[in-house]
């Protein structure tokens, strides 16, 4: 599926083709506000961090879900570095 993601390393939006599967995605159901992370996805040597609101996922290179310990809080902390 083609989606638009924000690439903070390049400072722009880009269209990427990604498949969200159980093997490459961790979803979080305990989202309550727009600052929460709804899912993290391993993608092309990096990670897509998707916010709970309708904002664009963040594409961050050289990080995996395993590096974050599949943890929602750590994903939010990483995303806040690039905001």
Image (cartoon, rainbow, N blue to C red):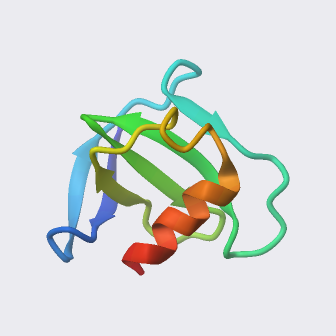
71 versus 50 height, above or below: above
Count of numbered labels shown in the rendering? 0
In the image, is 27 to the left or to the right of 4?
right
| Quadrant in the picture for residue 4 | bottom left
43 versus 7 height, above or below: above
Residue sticking out furthest to the bottom: 83
Quadrant where the image shows the C terminus: bottom left
Q: Which residue is painted at 62% across and 35% down in the image?
A: 26
Q: Position of residue 13 (x, y in %)?
A: 23, 69
| Quadrant in the picture for residue 77 | bottom right
Q: Position of residue 43 (x, y in %)?
A: 33, 36
60 versus 83 height, above or below: above
Q: Which residue is painted at 19% across and 77% down in the image?
A: 11
In the image, is 67 to the left or to the right of 74?
left
Quadrant where the image shows the N terminus: top left
Residue sticking out furthest to the left: 10
Q: Position of residue 12 (x, y in %)?
A: 19, 74
């Amino acid at each position: 599926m083609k989606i638009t993601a924000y690439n903070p390393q390049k400072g722009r939006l880009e269209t990427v083709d990604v498949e969200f599967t159980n093997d490459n995605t961790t979803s979080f159901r305990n989202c309550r506000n727009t600052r929460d992370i709804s899912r993290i996805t391993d993608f092309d040597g990096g990670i897509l961090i998707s916010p709970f609101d309708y904002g664009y996922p963040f594409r961050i290179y050289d990080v995996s879900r395993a590096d974050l310990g599949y943890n929602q809080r750590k994903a939010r902390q990483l995303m806040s570095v690039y905001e």
